[in-house]
Amino acid sequence: MYCILMAGGSGSRFWPHSRKKRSKQFLSLVGKQTLIESTVRRFLPLTSPDHLFVVSNIGQKCEMEKQHLPVPSQNIIYEPIGKNTAPCIGLAALFVEARDPEAIMVVSPADHLIRQEDRFRKTVMAAVSLAGQKDALVTIGIQPDRPATGYGYIQIKENLGKLNGISSFSVRTFAEKPNLATAERFLKSGDFYWNSGIFIFKISVLLKAFEKYAPDLYEALLTLKKVIGNNNYEETLEKVYRQIRGISIDYAIMEKADNVFLVKGEFEWNDLGSWEQTYKLSKKDSDGNAIQGDVVTMDSRNCYISTSSGVIAVIGMEDIIIVQEKDATLICRRDRVEDVKKIVERFKRKNLQKYL
Amino acid sequence: MYCILMAGGSGSRFWPHSRKKRSKQFLSLVGKQTLIESTVRRFLPLTSPDHLFVVSNIGQKCEMEKQHLPVPSQNIIYEPIGKNTAPCIGLAALFVEARDPEAIMVVSPADHLIRQEDRFRKTVMAAVSLAGQKDALVTIGIQPDRPATGYGYIQIKENLGKLNGISSFSVRTFAEKPNLATAERFLKSGDFYWNSGIFIFKISVLLKAFEKYAPDLYEALLTLKKVIGNNNYEETLEKVYRQIRGISIDYAIMEKADNVFLVKGEFEWNDLGSWEQTYKLSKKDSDGNAIQGDVVTMDSRNCYISTSSGVIAVIGMEDIIIVQEKDATLICRRDRVEDVKKIVERFKRKNLQKYL
């Protein structure tokens, strides 16, 4: 069994804390460890460090090396350009295949928050058995507790019973991020789960799925397979990556395949998709403010106020996100955090790229 | 005729732009010149630079010297501690008296905004004649155009007619900053004027008033008079300033004296008492935002957003003051600017004095 941690995101939703060269997985959004560090530590009890791979972006190499992760350096794979999750997972599969073509791989984002780790690992192990038994593409689905509109959903079909106490199902369909009415319907129906982005499959099963549902990508993988470990690997990788389409594993394979299964994740999970979620997960004072760094407030309530450089004085504010870094400050209504991504795009037009 | 510019204020109302060592008069709150620079230039057509004195605080000496004001350096007087306006004006009077005991002096704060400068100077000249003719303590009163609660008021008694086109009155009483109901009554009555803090009197008349209404301060002035120009001046000044009470010229003399007159100031005047006033005087974009520096806004209206260091991104905010300096940021509702002073006091309790 091999674990692949995907750590190549750009993460402008956490600007100004996240930047082009320091994306979300390198932040300590909750607690002291960076998200990638927590993710590595979450997987280590399941496998040896030698079986743990990290896929990141070449632009983040510096930041990655600063992490001093307990992972052999040859297990850190850098993509020359981000092309979404399908090429990333395909590339990692080639590295694993070179070691053991019969291996099962667990693929996980490196920037999520997971609590109740024992239960998490138990769920992963159940998914690993299922993937081995059924030659299946397995995903972990999180039972929704609210009609979230920020997640993709997966609808289950048939209950397959429990594996070591973990429920498992066959999958009917994948659904994109819904609007609120649809999310409420999903929640009420009881057979929709949040898509955690964690996938488990045999290398051979995955590669067959690439061949069947994304033959263009499969062909690219065959080209890359020939050069892994060779002198011309980097050059070929860059050439291939320039040409292939960027597409998620969900779109490219999971939504099309007929051998998809889901195990039910009953642990605390959060994809930390916005500052609002960070606020919700943070400790608050008696005014409902979550505060980090030198901050003085007066008559202010239910705010997230964080500064890593300098002081912030806040008077008469409610339900606001304030994040200050050395050279940049964000001030945003809590119900507008989805627009952080958009405002950051405006920086280019205003010739303020240096702050990205 | 001599002009005395009082530039010793601490000005925590403009934190974080103003600090302990860089008080309001050294800021460019509106336009490019600092307020003290504008004030000096406003008075220069009335008198020679040699007749222009500036009184500041020793803690601000560095900042003062950076201003390169067109004033001889021996005309810049430093107080060892701020003791409000009465000691400040008394000390300046001693310096002027040493040059010309019959001189008339015009005393003005160095941190106000005045537009229509020709009319301003015409008003000062009318006040100078009145002070000379009547041996009077003269003040400039500003006709209110709204029931402001942030200013002191002066009630007129008798209309003395016009001097070079400027109306003049005898004064009935001084009133402290009123509440809104009282301010509305003042405005309606038509015989209340805003106290501009600008005073005009003969040196001899002023010193007699000190003798009569503030004999303790007068005695202190006699002590200082003996040491001006001597080796032991600084030592004596410090000793005297440590002992005397801090009191405004309004309380110590103007409210008690019976020879007080007012000339009507019909020029645009603003004491720039808060960030709200700075917002009101600033140019706004089509969203009503007044913006300085690297700022990106989205769906934000009627905000004052200024940064001298780094970028600020603002999403979904209305009626907010945001001021960012290298090591400090203020975020304050526009209707709460009076509390900036108070929040700055809280810094001490929180051991954040370094930001003051």
Image: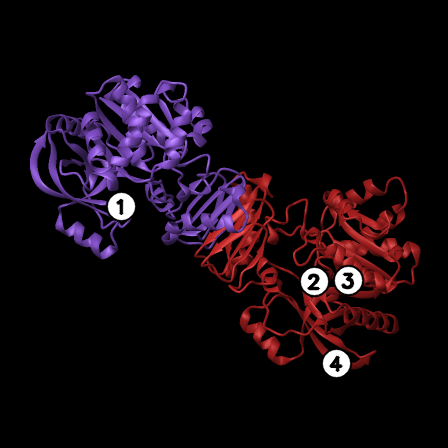
Chain colours: A purple, B red
CA separation in Å, label 1 and label 4: 76 Å
Percent across and percent down for residue A195 are 23, 41
Disc 2 from disc 4: Cα separation: 29 Å
Task: Establish whether labels 2 and 1 are both on one chain.
Answer: no
Local packing at callout 3 (Cα closer than 10 Å; few below 14, some 14-19, many 20+) is some
Kind of residue indicated by mark 1: Tyr
Q: What SS does tag 4 mark?
A: strand
Between tags 2 and 1, which lies in front?
Answer: 1
Which of the marked residues, 3 or 4, is nearer the chain's N terminus? Answer: 4
* Badges 2 and 3, same chain: yes
Position of A21 with respect to A153 (left or right) is right
CA distance for labels 3 and 4:
23 Å
Q: Which residue is mark 4?
A: B158
Three-letter code for the amino acid on which mark 2 is drawn: Leu
- Can the viewer see residue A82 in this picture? no
Badge 4 crowding class, 10 Å Cα cut-off, few under 14, some 14 to 19, many 20 or more, is some
If the image is split into quadrants, where does the N terminus of chain A sit? top left
Q: Which residue is mark 3?
A: B213
Q: CA distance from mark 2 to mark 1?
A: 54 Å
Identify the chain of the residue marked 4, using the numbered disc in the image.
B
Q: Tell me, yes or no, whether the two marked residues, 3 and 4, touch with CB atoms within 8 Å.
A: no
Q: Which residue is mark 2?
A: B113
Residue type for callout 3: Tyr
User: In the rendered structure, the residue with mark 2 lies on which chain?
Assistant: B
